[in-house]
Amino acid sequence: MEMKLLTEHYHKDEFRRLDGYKKFGGYEVLKKALKMQPQQIIDEVKASGLRGRGGAGFPTGTKWGFLPKNNEPRYLLCNADEGEPGTYKDRLMMERAPHQLIEGMIIAGHATCSKKGYIYIRGEYNYIILIVEHALEEAYKAGLLGKNILGSGIDFDLDVYAGAGAYICGEETGMISSLEGKKGQPKLKPPFPAVQGYLRKPTIVNNVETLAAVVPILRDGAPAYKKIGTEKSPGTKLFSLSGNVVRPGNYEVPLGFPMKDLIYKLGGGLRPGRRLKAVIPGGSSAPVITAAEAESATLDYECLAQMGTMLGSGAVIAIDDSQCMVDMLAVLTHFYHHESCGQCTPCREGTGWLNKVVHSIVEGRGRLQDIDLLVKVADNMKGRTICALSDAAALPVLSFVTKFRDEFEFYVREGRSKVKGVSHAQVHH
Amino acid sequence: MFQLSQAGKDKILKELNRYEAKESAIIPALYIAQQENGGWISDQVIERLSEVMSLPVARINEVFQFYTMFNKKPVGRHHVQVCCNISCALNGGRELANQICKELKVGYDEVTEDGRFSVTRVECLGSCGTAPMMQVNDKYYENLTPESAMNILRGLK
Amino acid sequence: MPKCTINGKEIEVKDGTTIIEAMHHHDMHIAHYCWHPGLSVAGVCRLCMIEIEGMPRVQIACNTVVTEGMKINNTSQKVKEAVKWGLDFHLINHPLDCPICDQAGECGLQEQYMEYGKYDPEMAEKKVKKHKVVDLGPTVVLDSERCILCSRCVRFTTEVSKSNELGIFNRGDRSEIGTFEEKPLNNKYSLNTVDICPVGALTSKDFRFRQRVWYLKDAETVCNGCSTGCKVQTFFNKEGLFRVKPVYDKEVNGYWMCDDGRDLYKFVNREHRYLKASHREGSGWTQVIPGAAAKEAAAAVTAAGDKLALVLTGQYTVEEYEKIVSIFSKDLKTKKIYHWLNNKETVNSFDGLLIRGDKNPNTKGLLQTLQKHNISTAWSELESGLASGAIKTVVVAGPENHAFFKDIEEKVQLFNKAGTVIWLQAAKNPALEKLSGNAWIIPMKSYVEKDGTFINHAGQHRKFKRVTTVVSESLTLGEAAELLAGHQIMVKPESNLLVEADRQADKVTVEHRKKNEFVFKRGAL
């Protein structure tokens, strides 16, 4: 069932502290890695097939390989902004095992020849910031960070940067902008961060889970990692289960795990008398799938991509039949409208437009052409912007309207929800 | 007339040297200033920061207005932020927020008469497994019901 | 030097050129708002869409560098759809202000709408409300609702004027351009932001509501505010000049001009000009026709003999200097020609961008002419000559943009010592009332009313043509010199376009407005 490659010792309080972490094999892998050449580590990570765990699923080894082969100072940034609705796995990892992340970052820093790394943590995670800062202090004191780590001759500095409440800072170039002290607005690509990122220097941005996964990969070797999961999606992943299940939580399972097992076996299923209606498989930006589709879905990149959705951040949100899909879409469009950074026109105006149209439907003022309008607007927001927030805002709209069109049409015709029987005007903004 | 305390200025100067780019210190400086100004940031605060950090006011103001966690209006001593995003909404988060407003007799983004509470609705706080939940100033309070939420709030001075 | 094909036409470009730059250089039409050749690339309007063979999605032209063999087109259906929707997104919250907006007729949104617009709007929701009529500073007004957040003005104040007054505040569709309360938009280049704003969000307080742009003709000339000599475009009709905008000149001013230079058109319009010559003898002034006045003054000039002096400011064209200096030195046989420079201490100052301390456009031209005629004099000689009585008649070619000459009153007192002063000037100046003795004020043509050449601080020659005629009876410096020397010449007042305006000839066609970067072609209704 669960496979605790990363989370094996998370339940132990002492694992948070350096002494406890070391007790269970912590920093042994670092010692091994410091003796390897940077290219060897990159090759090992490439061979393991590790894919970015933040949402995009880009092969990590390949990303590291994009760095230019010169002496330019480069930076390693850890994306701990975790803003994707439904996701809370990085919080768990940094709370229970900050040293796992630190070890992973030092190894990654060595592999990418970076001398400086930053962990960008979202501002709302106040106590997490304190935990990570404390762990960094412990690491510095123990000679695991700074100059000449463990006598290897390798230097690496790590610091924490607190965000201030912006989902867009979870986008890699948005995060780089924020770290540079500007508004967290994404930058034009090209140039890509690996070539010109933080302060115009080569930069690698990785998610917390991706960097932590480097540790077991180097410890057990790439072939062992590849044996877990599926061929194109090797390894384990933490899935943040939430919504209408009885036992929501973070579960680490091998990729390829059946979605229904996650929801019913690990998650304890739905509340008594309730049936599953829909599942959002990878955070709010992933297109929704119906309960029927969820029956046969497995939690890996290919299966979900084939179904027209995506694994994303691995936040599985279960929606039961007591929920109104139109209402839930209104929650999501409000979110994207609030979080659009405002730089490029299609996203800035489009998120506002989508939000207004969906809200007029839930307030009972919808027109029949509004449903097709939503599809048209969302279609024309995709692929035309600087970053993917526009796509992330458009995909839920397209999927909700396509798969649950009957609920939308009912709401427009009758002015109230098919499921709840009333319009939701009083609950909304 | 808002003035930064000496301790505050020292902290900000430390932040200016901590990161590679001078502007990176703007976010930490805004946090420090917000705390000294009773939980929100006014025009005067921005001016003081511009003087202390030797950065143009327009740049500091841009950063200030962009991020949600910097308060543009006065807030209560306990700033209650209730998550209303998808996982919490599936578990009654929005109804919880309404209930809290009703019990505290205050509207959204307003401060109670005695200055004790202000309530606002926020987006995902990364606590979806323990929905519904709220954040009061720095602390998370999770797995709430309307009753447990009110008990917690009543206990806050 | 990669070669590429754009819309079927093969062109060769320099390494590192972006597609939009290539199209711009070859006069190919591509819709755009946020790109400007004088500013950094922002890529936020998402309108400059192009299709590149081999790439599935449409790309933006402003951030894509041309590579060898690229096949680009922006005429396919796919691109047109993308641009149409891009424009639609701009319009959904844009207010319906055209009837009261200054930008109408040269507005980026109007032009694109005529080309791509949907005539049946689908946006049925309420538009976002923002601040209207925001006072950004002494010269610029902002209307946030009209703003399309292209960020050109912000990039300008950050990169060009480096004054950092403007920023984009807030997030998403609540974003607004603005200044901070205590730091208004108040630098010497503020009005350039009004020029580059593609819509009517930033408007000039000076030009607001004064004239519709389709009633304005335009002509290029050279600014006469300082020795930089920016190339400018003046807008005028029969009522006079209305505004001045910069024109790109690679070697002189790039894409910009300063605010002081823009105000100079005010010295040209009729209400600020001497329409008739004046003659004082005793206590009162009498009005005389300029040509006649010059002939009368000629008598005083010849009577002066060698007690004649000529004072020149660096405000006239090279051709005029040639005329007047050769007449005075050869025909009138005087070597007492002096150069009036009003600010020796600050004359070489330079603010780093465009404004120079020498407020004369053609000092170099004057000095060159004086040198050619072997005239080298010092101002102290004039002063001692006036004090001793060796100089009894002074002919002064006064400064046109007299606002920058702080010492006019002082000079009037000085010249009064001579007894006879003939002052040649275009723009009205109350300080000249103080001329005493036997004095003439003869109106001159302003810089927009004549052809000529200015030589700027760097020695660059710039020829300009006459824009229009404002005061037809006024004289050029050359004509004045001839008449003062007693030569008989015919002074023909040119047909005064402003007074005898023929409505048909005055009609502004799209050719006139083509210099505006957003006006490509007239849309078909």
Image (spheres, coloured by chain):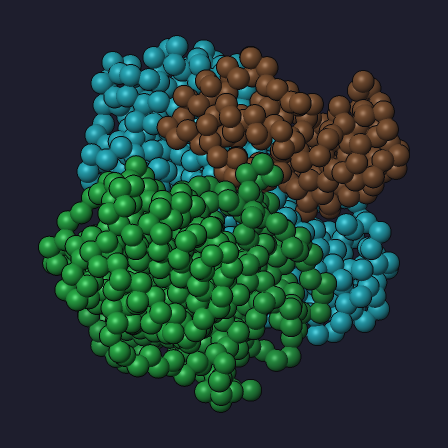
Identify by letter the chain in brown: B
Along the viewing direction, whichever of A137 and C498 lies nearer the viewer: C498
Corner quadrant of residue A377: bottom right
Residue at image location 46% in from the left, 18% down from the top: B14
Residue B109's x, y, as percent? Answer: 76, 38
- The quadrant the N terminus of chain C occupies is bottom left
Q: Colour of chain A?
A: cyan
Look at the image and tell me whether residue C418 can be seen: yes
Q: Colour of chain C?
A: green
Residue at image location 68% in from the left, 47% down from the top: B86
Residue A174's x, y, as percent? Answer: 47, 43
Residue B31's x, y, as percent? Answer: 58, 26
Along the viewing direction, whichever of C260 and C382 lies nearer the viewer: C382
* C39 relative position to B132: left or right: left
Residue C58's x, y, as percent? Answer: 41, 68
* C109 relative position to C27: left or right: right
